[in-house]
């Protein structure tokens, strides 16, 4: 039996996400960037052990918990600044 695809269809259909997923070196650089590490630190601080569970649920098509954590982090000044820094790095709007 084959393993299920860990990448949700919604990500594959988003042009920016699809481009990033098609560039393993770029994805690796983005994931190891200071901006991403800072945002991950904030998410971990906010959600603790719940972040992993929420990410797993989102991968299975149930993003509500992960979106709640993201909204909580982004509502803080430090979180919104971290997201803006990441957007600048990726060229996102």
Image (tube, rainbow, N blue to C red):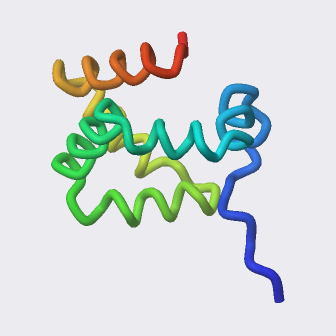
Q: Residue at x 22, y 45 (%)?
A: 41
Q: Position of residue 22 (x, y in %)?
A: 74, 41
The residue at the point 56 percent across, 41 percent down is 27
Q: Give the vertical position of 34 relative to 61 (above or below).
A: above
Image quadrant holding the N terminus, namely bottom right
Q: Residue at x 30, y 27 (%)?
A: 74
> Taking 89 as reference, is 58 above or below it?
below
The residue at 62%/62% (across/down) is 60
Q: Quadrant of the C terminus?
A: top right
Q: Nearer the viewer, residue 55 or 3?
A: 3
Closest to the observer: 63 or 6? Answer: 6
Horizontal side, residue 89 vs residue 21: left or right: left
Q: Quadrant of residue 42?
A: top left
Q: Residue 78, image x and y in percent? A: 17, 24
Q: Is residue 25 above or below residue 15?
A: below
In the image, residue 3 above or below residue 70: below
Residue 47 picture location, percent across and down: 24, 53
Residue 87, picture quadrant: top left
């Amino acid at each position: 039996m084959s393993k299920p695809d860990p990448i949700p269809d919604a990500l594959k259909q988003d042009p920016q996400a699809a481009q990033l997923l098609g560039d393993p070196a770029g994805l690796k650089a983005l994931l190891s960037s200071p901006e991403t590490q800072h945002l991950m630190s904030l998410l971990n601080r906010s959600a603790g052990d719940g972040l992993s569970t929420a990410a797993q649920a989102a991968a299975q098509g149930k993003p509500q918990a992960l979106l709640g954590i993201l909204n909580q982090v982004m509502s803080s000044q430090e979180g919104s600044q971290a997201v803006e820094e990441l957007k600048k790095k990726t060229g996102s709007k």
